[in-house]
Amino acid sequence: MPTEKRWVVKPQGDPQTVAKLASELQISPVLANLLVQRGIDTLGKADKFFKPSLSDLHDPFLMKDMDVAVARVERAVERHEKIMVYGDYDVDGCTAVSLVYKFLRQIGHKDLMFYIPDRYTEGYGISIKGIDLAAQKGVKLIIALDCGIKAMEKVVYAKNKGVDFIICDHHLPADEIPQAVAVLDPKRVDCHYPFDELSGCGVGFKLVQAYAQKHNIPFEQITSLLDLLVVSIASDIVPLVGENRILAHFGLKDLNHNPSSGLLSIIKICGLDRHNITIDDIVFKIGPRINAAGRMRMDENDENASPSGGHAAVELLIEGNEQQAAKFGKVIDDYNQDRKSIDRHVTQEAHNYIESNPELKCRKSTVVYNPKWMKGIVGIVASRLIETYYRPTIVLTMSNGFVTGSARSVPGFDLYQAVESCSDLLENFGGHMYAAGLTMRPENIEEFTRRFNNYVEQHIDPQMLIPQVDIDSELHFSDITPQFRRDLNRFQPFGPGNASPIFVSHNACNNGDAKLVGQEHEHLRMGLMQRQKPNNRLQSIAFQQPTHYEWIRSGRPIDICYQIVENHFRGSISAQLRIKDIKPVINR
């Protein structure tokens, strides 16, 4: 179990470039250094970074098959064909379905339905059940979002039933591309679209943008959909650079000032209607509630239950009536409360199992299995276990006669390759370097566990098993002025590719007001000052870090690394340090 974190200070920017940029922009050299570290080393680049513009979005018709996709949607609209908007059951899929569905409804297309597969009975991606329902309902076109790039056989099956497919995906394709009418995926080898890090919802938005562009629909008429898109971008953890940064910037404006009724209901439930919503708020509060619906198992005996949990999430996101949306929002929140209760219980069970098994506890990877665990939360549990044991982790359960599970990794270790090395034991698998899903027959669990553990033992660098904090630069508390905070806020939205900076400060201390807070006293709240300038006192919170409480409360010195966030309390806004790690200063 990791106790000590490695602090690694990133390479600093060229001093002359930093000084020049700080002078030109009239900002702190610390912030100019942050820009240079992010590859923003000229006034022109900084101007684009600080002033995102929708005019800098790429022409959607640069994407392979976009012209064909738009033509097929036009035909469906002109002929009043029934369209099914189909998407995955996670946040990206549900927001993508809602965005495209709302746009088609906005342009007056009435013969419309949406479909979200059930995680438990259909699994991920295009399902035969969904195609059969489409054919039965007279659907002529399915627009698949956030899935479908590997659905070769399903697309042929649909074609034989008279149903066309447009696929809008952002996952890595196989060597073969489905024989759909159009396949929009910027990661296609033969697609030369300038930005390939869009979310699934982002690809759906480009289809909407292309249709609007061809039909001279003012761009302002589709910007109301950006609140859905920013929820997708934040929740799917795509890089917040390029187009994603532009779309997220304007999406956050909509989310804060004019959210759709469905998102407004979640915002109110989360208590986010009283302050400025950030990417973090989406990741930790809004996204999990939408995700929870797709994770939970529906009651098969309830005649009034939605066809799938994800279906309920889309119903919420497309609802235009605030009162009805509030009711749907309550349902979604209940799903989330149930999900939290279940994942806490399962995490504790997994933790107890590891702690009672000395051999497993000492390994460099974790593979745990319990046939009773809920399939929809094993990915969350894997992430929770990494917080404790910090090593590649797979959590398995039983579903429909097969063992299925989710894998999560630590920075630097290619989990996908580790899973792929056992592919002969798997029925199917997919994912990327840091997360994967897999399915196998029950009789293969023991051999899979042995081989996966062996692969990790042989290939992981021991340094990867020690948590690392990447520090941008050193900062003195006296530098954290109101102007500094205003300039730092211009770096938002923060996320992958543009992470919230982490600073380090030395010789901080507390004057005795430190206290443990939280249901289990697991968090540490305190005021901190630096001894050389004790007048600069900053409120700080260290989540899940109660260890050094007595040392800190006694006033002894510590080094800290932290992010600077805004604390909203009773209408006032102040700076707060979100502590990432603490090191007692013993001999200095």
Image (cartoon, rainbow, N blue to C red):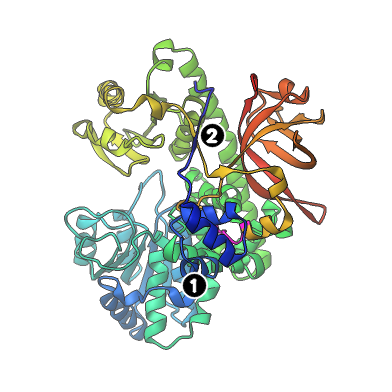
Residue corresponding to mark 2:
343
Residue 506 to residue 107: above or below: above
Q: In this view, does 283 lie to the left or right of 57?
A: right
Image quadrant assignment for residue 403: top left
Q: Residue at x 57, y 60 (%)?
A: 22
Percent across and percent down for residue 335 are: 58, 46
Q: How crowded is mark 2: few (under 14 residues within 10 Å), some or many (20 or more)?
A: many
Secondary structure of the residue carrying numbered label 2: helix
Q: Which of 114 and 135 is in front in this view?
A: 114
Residue type at the position of mark 1: Lys
Is there any visible trace of residue 510 in the rendered image? yes
Is there any visible trace of residue 312 in the rendered image? no
Q: Nearer the viewer, residue 458 or 76?
A: 458
Image quadrant assignment for residue 75: bottom left
Q: Which of 167 and 132 is in front in this view?
A: 167
Give the magenta range. 488-494
Q: Residues within 10 Å of mark 1 (few under 14, many from 20)?
A: some
Residue corresponding to mark 1:
102
Percent across and percent down for residue 217 are: 45, 86
